[in-house]
Structures are given as structure tokens and as C-alpha cells.
Image (tube, rainbow, N blue to C red):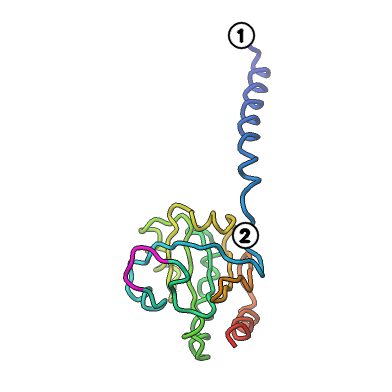
């Protein structure tokens, strides 16, 4: 019979081996997009709310791509359902959305959020809890999150009509004035 210390060491070595086998796959994961990168083609699950499709100028379909949406500049926010920082950022971005509308940029600039890993029930909860005034889409299987390099949340991107990333920010965007000015400059 093995001594308990030896058995523990063998178990740890076995676990370390399993971890090491998974590291090459993790090392191959893409990095989150940076300014100047082209956004990959992302396929979104359509919202259950008709007003979200109307906001983006989309037909009534089960899925859509950003190429089908009507915008010149898109603010894409990746959030986590249970991310306290995402809930902290929601009212700031609601204010930003209202500011964009007051500036007359709402025809050119659209905001959307993607809730990584969210079930339909979790999405409804987050939408209500944080009172999102712009569309919130779910990414239940994390496919969009993976295509974007699995960023920590919240992760914010500005993308132009050509699919070029013109701004990124990981974490809560605290300087909403600077972001609004960046959006205005990009929309001109």
C-alpha cells in the first residue's frame, strides 16, 4: 500500500499532467481585438424583442451578422451575467446612449451588449435588473466570446461599418465624456 504522502504526490502529478495537456489549446486562444484589427464575422442570436431588430434595422430572423445591421459606428459591449462591474457600467452606457440620441447621432451610432453565457432567463433578468435601454443579446454557448478572444468583462469595442476596431477598453469605462468624444469624432 502506498504511503499517503506518495499517493498525494502521484495524484498531483497526474492532475498536473492533465493540465499541461490542456495548456497548448489555451495558449492558442486568440487575443481580444485591438484598435486597427478587423472584427471577425460574428453571428448573433436575434433578440426576442422586436424593438431590438427595429433599432438595428434588421429583418425578423433567428440570427444576424453585423454586416446586416444599420450603423456607421457600433459600440459592442461584452458583459457577464454575474459580473458586478458590468452592472456598474450599465447606467453609464444608458446615459451614453441618451447622450448619443440628444446629439442626433442615433441614426449613425448604435449600442449593443452581448451577455456571454446567458440563458434566456438570465438575459431577461440582466435586462430588467440593469435597465438596459439598448439591445442586449445572449451568447449562451460562449461562441461570440470565444471568437473575440475570451476577454474579461466588461469589454467594450467601437467598430466602424467596415468592421475595423477603432477603440477597445477592458473594464468599466469611467470617462464617458472621452468615449462620447471618440464616438463623435468617429461618426464625422
Above or below: residue 21 compared with residue 119: above
Position of residue 126 measured from the top left corner of the image (x, y, whole percent)? 43, 64
Q: Which residue lies furthest to the top in this view?
A: 1
> Upstream in the sequence, badge 2 or badge 1?
1
Dividing the image into 4 quarters, which one contains the N terminus? Answer: top right
Query: Would residue 177 be found to the left or right of residue 126 on screen?
Result: right
Q: Residue 88, can we see it?
A: yes
* Magenta span contains residue 161: no
Circle 1 crowding by C-alpha within 10 Å: few under 14, some 14–19, many from 20 = few
Indicate the quadrant where residue 184 lies: bottom right
In the rendered structure, find residue 27 and report the number of the disc placed on it: none
- Considering depth in this image, is 149 or 151 the residue closer to the camera? 149
- Considering depth in this image, is 15 or 63 the residue closer to the camera? 63
Position of residue 56 measured from the top left corner of the image (x, y, whole percent)? 42, 76
Magenta stretch in the rendered image: 59-64
Residue under pointer 1: 1
Position of residue 93 measured from the top left corner of the image (x, y, whole percent)? 53, 76
Residue under pointer 2: 32
What secondary structure characterizes most of the magenta part? loop
Residue at 60% x, 66% y: name it.
38
Name the secondary structure under disc 2. loop
Above or below: residue 131 compared with residue 144: below
Above or below: residue 141 compared with residue 12: below
* Magenta span contains residue 63: yes
Indicate the quadrant where residue 45 lies: bottom left
Dividing the image into 4 quarters, which one contains the C terminus? Answer: bottom right
Query: Would residue 48 be found to the left or right of residue 71 on screen?
Result: left
Name the secondary structure under disc 1. loop
Above or below: residue 187 compared with residue 136: below
Circle 2 crowding by C-alpha within 10 Å: few under 14, some 14–19, many from 20 = some
Amino acid at each position: 500500500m502506498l504511503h499517503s504522502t506518495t499517493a498525494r504526490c502521484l495524484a498531483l502529478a497526474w492532475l498536473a499532467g492533465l493540465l499541461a495537456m490542456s495548456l497548448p489549446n489555451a495558449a492558442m486562444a486568440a487575443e481580444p481585438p485591438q484598435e486597427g484589427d478587423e472584427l471577425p464575422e460574428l453571428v448573433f442570436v436575434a433578440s426576442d424583442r422586436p424593438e431590438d431588430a427595429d433599432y438595428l434595422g434588421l429583418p425578423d430572423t433567428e440570427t444576424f451578422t453585423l454586416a446586416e445591421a444599420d450603423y456607421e459606428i457600433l459600440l459592442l459591449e461584452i458583459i457577464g451575467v454575474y459580473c458586478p462591474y458590468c452592472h456598474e457600467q450599465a447606467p453609464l452606457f444608458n446615459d451614453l446612449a441618451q447622450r448619443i440620441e440628444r446629439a442626433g447621432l442615433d441614426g449613425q451610432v448604435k449600442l449593443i451588449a452581448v451577455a456571454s453565457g446567458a440563458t434566456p432567463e438570465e438575459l431577461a433578468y440582466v435586462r430588467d435588473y440593469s435597465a438596459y435601454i439598448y439591445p442586449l443579446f445572449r451568447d449562451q454557448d460562449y461562441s461570440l466570446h470565444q471568437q473575440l478572444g475570451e476577454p474579461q468583462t466588461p469589454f467594450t469595442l467601437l467598430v466602424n461599418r467596415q468592421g475595423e476596431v477603432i477603440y477597445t477598453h477592458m473594464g468599466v469605462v469611467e470617462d464617458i465624456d472621452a468615449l462620447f468624444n471618440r464616438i463623435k469624432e468617429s461618426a464625422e
